[in-house]
Structures are given as structure tokens and as C-alpha cells.
């Protein structure tokens, strides 16, 4: 495997692929055509050097992913909005009056903040409160930290299982699989064709799902060491340590995405297993969307020539 530098995410009936500052979102519209939007996004770590330091950059990389994710989701959703001709409600009119042209950015900001708060509440605080019930019979802080971690993972798995029953989410997971397959196809030295992509793995070590499971595992290690007696202080410690845990987890994920060592591959197994829940096998039409997004931001032929000289690259078709 050769690191390519490209990454992406699934959106509504489409895929976003990013390479350096360029990103492209390809969406399969209701009429069957593929619509592509290509733009630039400069990450926070590029704008502020401090944000690019090891163990700091993970938090800002996560913030970049959320911002970019909201933008691309908004673009993909625009092709599937209903009742476009209906009259706006009172709340929409109030938002337009107060925020004007900035209303979309304000809403995106609110959704991101709300999402982060809910994620911390559900996946960090709630497991602590559930585990705290067992303190009457468990007196070992190490066992309690492990129990809390197991509950955290169980909540996450249950959440994924429940939402995967929804048709729209299931299709998004299929596009997620197409995204991984495209990247794996190239990073294993194969040309970007539907057949080669279909034959590639739907699991990838740099996946956001792996990041989340790594966060949950590393949190167990942190909370074995950080010990406080008061339940309210435990809640505060869970919230305060989120950026620290995220920073450490990001460094491991970054290493895993660039390494093929036996140890790194072994440590990556839990995240790869978890991807079986968040990626599904795509159909050929979804693979075509993923290829279209890659073609907009990545010269994969040049990449293959440099890293896999043995691969036969197809000649350019005359225009």
C-alpha cells in the first residue's frame, strides 16, 4: 500500500473526495446524471501553524472535517429537497430577517455545535453515568474504566445498528464503501476502473469510523489513570479530556494510514472491524460517482506511474 494523500466522505447520494486544498463533491441526481462541484478548502492547521503541531492538529482536523462535511452535505441535499415552491414558515422568515445572507452559515454553526454537545453527552457522559451504578459492587477503578469503555462502545454499536436500518443511511453506507474502494484501488497499484474498484476492499485504516473506535479505546487508558472521587468531577474530566484523547487518537490514525507494519495493522483491527457496520458493498453506479469525484481532484495516472511503475496505464483517449 502506498499513501496517496486523498480522503473523502459519503454524502447524500454521492461522495466528496479531497486532495490537499482541493475537494470535489459528486452527486447522482434524481435524473441519473452526475453533478460535480469542485472547490478549495484551506485547513485550520495551514492557516495557523500552531494548529498543525502533533497532538494538537487532531482536534482541528476533526473541526475541518465537520465544516467540510456540512458544506458537502448541504450541496448534495439541495438536489433532493421537496416543496421548493412552498411558502417559508414564520421561523424561516425570522431567521432571514435577523441573519440575512448569513443564515445558512449560522444554521451550519448551530448544527455543528449541537452535534458535538450531543456526541459528548451520549458517548462520553452517559456511559460514565451508567457505569457509576455498578460502583456499589465494583471497587476497582481499573475495572470501572474498562466497564465504562465497554458501555461506550456498546452504545456506539447499537446506535449504528439502529440508523443503518433506514434506507437513506444504508445507501450512504454503500457510498462510504465506494469511497474506500476507490482509495484502496489506487493505493494498491490498480487503475481506476469500475472492475478494479469493485474488487478492492471497503475497509481503510484512515476511516473516520476507525478514528471513533480508537478514541473509545484510548479513553479507557486515560480514565484508568485519571481518577477522581466526585461524580461531577468525573463528568468534567470526561469533557475536558475529549480534545486530548482526540489528539492522541488522530496521531495513531495518521500513523496507521501511512504504515503497513504488522504491529500497526494489528492495532488497527478494531477500527477495521467496526467499518463492517458503516460501509456496505456499493453498486456500479455508486462506484462511478466515486471515480468521478477522484478524477476532479487527483491525477491518479501520475501517482501510479511514480509509485507503481509496473502498472500498465491506459493511453489518453484523443479529444
Image (cartoon, helix red, strand yellow):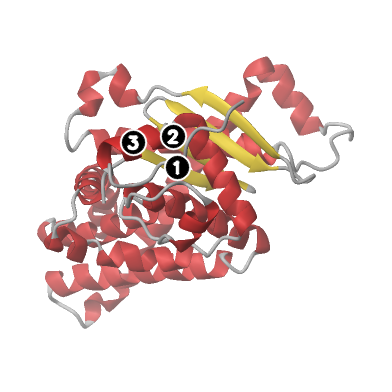
Instruction: Please report contact status of discs 3 and 2: CB closer than 8 Å, yes or no.
Output: no
Within 10 Å of disc 2 (Cα), the crowding (few <14, some 14-19, many 20+) is many
Front one among 188 and 235: 188
Helix, strand or loop for disc 2: strand
Asked if the residue under mark 2 is in contact with the one under mark 1, i.e. CB atoms within 8 Å, the reply is yes
Q: Position of residue 169 (x, y in %)?
A: 60, 59
- Left or right of 303, for residue 249: left
Residue at x 61% of width, y 69% of height: 165
Left or right for 177, reference 304: right
Q: Earlier in the sequence, mark 1 or mark 2?
A: 1
| Residue pointed to by mark 2 | 18
Residue 88 appears in which quarter of the rendering?
top right
Side of 247 relative to 305 (left or right) = left
Could you classify mark 3 by the number of other residues whose Cα lies within 10 Å: few (under 14), some (14-19), or many (20 or more)?
some
Q: Distance between the residues labelled 1 and 2?
A: 6 Å
Could you tell me if residue 229 is visible in this image? no
- The residue positioned 21% from the left and 71% from the top of the image is 146
Does residue 113 appear to the left or right of 218 in the view shown?
right
Q: Is mark 3 on a helix, strand or loop?
A: helix
| Residue mark closest to the camera, 3 vs 1 | 3
Q: Which mark is residue 303?
A: 3
The residue carrying mark 1 is 8
Amino acid at each position: 500500500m502506498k499513501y496517496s494523500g486523498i480522503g473523502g466522505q459519503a454524502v447524500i447520494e454521492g461522495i466528496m473526495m479531497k486532495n490537499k486544498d482541493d475537494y470535489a463533491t459528486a452527486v447522482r441526481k434524481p435524473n441519473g446524471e452526475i453533478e460535480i462541484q469542485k472547490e478549495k478548502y484551506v485547513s485550520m492547521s495551514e492557516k495557523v501553524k500552531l494548529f498543525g503541531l502533533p497532538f494538537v492538529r487532531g482536534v482541528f482536523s476533526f473541526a475541518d472535517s465537520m465544516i467540510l462535511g456540512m458544506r458537502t452535505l448541504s450541496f448534495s441535499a439541495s438536489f433532493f429537497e421537496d416543496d421548493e415552491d412552498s411558502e417559508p414558515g414564520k421561523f424561516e422568515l425570522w431567521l432571514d430577517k435577523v441573519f440575512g445572507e448569513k443564515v445558512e452559515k449560522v444554521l451550519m454553526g448551530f448544527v455543528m455545535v449541537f452535534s458535538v454537545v450531543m456526541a459528548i453527552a451520549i458517548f462520553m457522559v452517559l456511559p460514565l453515568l451508567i457505569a457509576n451504578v455498578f460502583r456499589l459492587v465494583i471497587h476497582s477503578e481499573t475495572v470501572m474504566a474498562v466497564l465504562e469503555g465497554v458501555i461506550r462502545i456498546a452504545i456506539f454499536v447499537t446506535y449504528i445498528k439502529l440508523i443503518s436500518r433506514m434506507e437513506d443511511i444504508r445507501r450512504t453506507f454503500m457510498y462510504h464503501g465506494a469511497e474506500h474502494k476507490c482509495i484502496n484501488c489506487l493505493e494498491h497499484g490498480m487503475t481506476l476502473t469500475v472492475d478494479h474498484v469493485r474488487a478492492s476492499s471497503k475497509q481503510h485504516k484512515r476511516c473516520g469510523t476507525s478514528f471513533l473506535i480508537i478514541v473509545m479505546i484510548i479513553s479507557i487508558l486515560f480514565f484508568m489513570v485519571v481518577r477522581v472521587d466526585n461524580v461531577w468531577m468525573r463528568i468534567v474530566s470526561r469533557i475536558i479530556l475529549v480534545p486530548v484523547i482526540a489528539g492522541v487518537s488522530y496521531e495513531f490514525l495518521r500513523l496507521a494510514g501511512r504504515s503497513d507494519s504488522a504491529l500497526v495493522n494489528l492495532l488497527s483491527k478494531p477500527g477495521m472491524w467496526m467499518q463492517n457496520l458503516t460501509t456496505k458493498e456499493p453498486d456500479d453506479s455508486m462506484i462511478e460517482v466515486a471515480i468521478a469525484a477522484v478524477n476532479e481532484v487527483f491525477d491518479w495516472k501520475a501517482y501510479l506511474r511514480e509509485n507503481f511503475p509496473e502498472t500498465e496505464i491506459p493511453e489518453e483517449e484523443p479529444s
